Image (cartoon, rainbow, N blue to C red):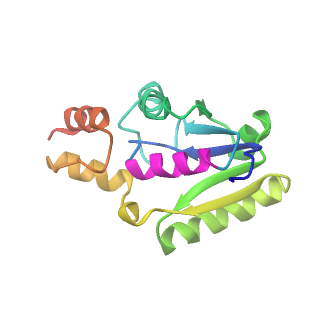
Amino acid sequence: MAPEKTGIAVCPGSYDPVTLGHLDIIARVSEVFETVIVAVVNSPVRKQKTVFTIEERVGFVEAEVAKLGNVQVKPFDTLIVDFARENDASAIVKGLRAISDFEYEFEMNQLNRKMAPDIESIYLMSSPQYSFLSSSGVKELAMFGGDLTDLVPPAVAARLQEALKR
């Protein structure tokens, strides 16, 4: 028997675009927490201008997580720890693909812990089939007309190909 799900977790990201790797992490988190809030950052600090608007990114994620009864999608433009507090979340959950992700996330974890020791950071290893998958890689493939099947949802692939045609 599975343990009872409790608590609220936040899964932050730019989701530009949302990938099947993101959706895998979100689905797995939804098996552990009572409520999962996918927090879509309005203007990412680490990335240049997004391909999709905040409304489009939220919409893509909402369409894909609709079948998960305990997942909500919300935009945010504050510190993630402030967003987590505003939403009564006890955890920030992110996926890790490689050592390079770990280095960045380790630094962010230390800063978040300093600002909000009451909010735990939890990391899930990506599933093997998504360990190479990144939004930036998907965008590059789309620019050159590459096959996005098995990387992003079909609606996202169609819209991305349209947005990034050279």
Residue found at the far right of this picture: 118
Residue 79 position (above or below residue 46): above
Residue found at the far front of this picture: 1
Say which residue appears at 36% left-offset and 58% top-offset. Answer: 133
User: In the picture, which quadrant includes the C terminus?
Assistant: top left
Residue 73 position (above or below residue 15): above
* Magenta extent: 20-31
> In the shown orientation, is residue 154 left or right of residue 134?
left
User: Picture quarter containing residue 79?
Assistant: top right
Say which residue appears at 31% left-offset and 56% top-offset. Answer: 137
Query: Is-magenta flag for residue 28?
Result: yes
Q: Position of residue 130 (x, y in %)?
A: 38, 60
Can residue 9 be seen here? yes
How many marks overall? 0
Say which residue appears at 79% left-offset and 39% top-offset. Answer: 85
Say which residue appears at 82% left-offset and 59% top-offset. Answer: 114
Q: Position of residue 119 (x, y in %)?
A: 79, 52
Query: Is-magenta flag for residue 86?
Result: no
Can residue 45 be seen here? no
Of residues 147 and 108, the one nearer the viewer is: 147
Q: Position of residue 92 (x, y in %)?
A: 68, 50
Residue found at the far bottom of this picture: 99
Could you tell me what secondary structure mostly forms the magenta stretch? helix
> In the shown orientation, is residue 65 left or right of residue 105?
left
